[in-house]
Amino acid sequence: MTSGPRLPLRRSLETAAGRRAYARRLFATIADRYDLITVLLSYGQDRRWKRQLADLAGPVQGRRVLDLACGTGDIAFALSARGAAVTGLDLTHRMLQIARARGATAGRSAQFVTGDMLALPFADAGFDMVTIGYGLRNVPELRPAIREIRRVLRPGGVMLSLDFDRPANPVLRTIYLGYLTIAGSLVGLLLHRDPDTYRYIPESIRRYP
């Protein structure tokens, strides 16, 4: 079985269907190197940012938390260690395999579910808090994802989202996106022989509200 030619990156991101297909392929490709790449491209700041998100969550002892786009489990494990009952959801099954292995090795507790943020497999008002690390920027359609998050949150529940923004200063913005483009291209070539692999990051930042 053969597949058709891949669209250029920017064309792939122009439609919801294109973004969905690209995200599925991308995260399946990078899952085993995901933790390394986030550390490299953020100069080691990724872990500090995730700790800050966990701090912003406040007291979570006994609270039901849904961690969306949970990846390999950093945020889920941080909140679980503080006493929350955490369920992590991610579209990429390989990410969750790595998360479960990490949890077993470190003795950390969290449940993990493979699923789509546009159709969450949970009952209404089932969680006290929803956390998301770099997730909203990657969904094919933002509004339906927000509606789903609202649906599964109890009244008065809290959503915390960690993501990149664009600097307001145009010079800094050019440098910032230029760095991510060049560094991402080089890392993509070295690790996957495809410069578009991580060039997706600045392209998605350009499109994120």
Image (cartoon, rainbow, N blue to C red):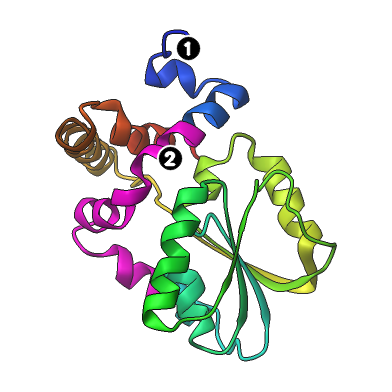
Majority secondary structure in the magenta region = helix
Give residue 40's quadrant in the image: bottom left
Residue 117 placement, left or right of 107: right
Q: Position of residue 144 (x, y in %)?
A: 73, 42
Residue 63, placed above or below residue 186: below
Residue at (50%, 44%) from the top-left corner?
A: 137
Q: Secondary structure at mark 1?
A: loop
Residue at (51%, 88%) from the top-left corner?
A: 82
Residue 67 placement, left or right of 177: right
Q: Position of residue 177 (x, y in %)?
A: 27, 37
Query: Which class describes the residues within 10 Å of circle 1: few (<14), some (14-19), or many (20+)?
Result: few
Q: Does the magenta run of residues contain 47?
A: yes
Residue 52 seen by the camera: no
Q: Position of residue 18 (x, y in %)?
A: 54, 22
Residue 89, placed above or below residue 86: above
Residue 199 placement, left or right of 147: left
Separation (CA) of disc 1 from disc 2: 17 Å
Magenta region: which residues?
23-52
Amino acid residing under circle 2: Ala
Q: Secondary structure at mark 2?
A: helix
Mark 1, residue position: 3
Mark 2, residue position: 28
Amino acid residing under circle 1: Ser
Q: Earlier in the sequence, mark 1 or mark 2?
A: 1
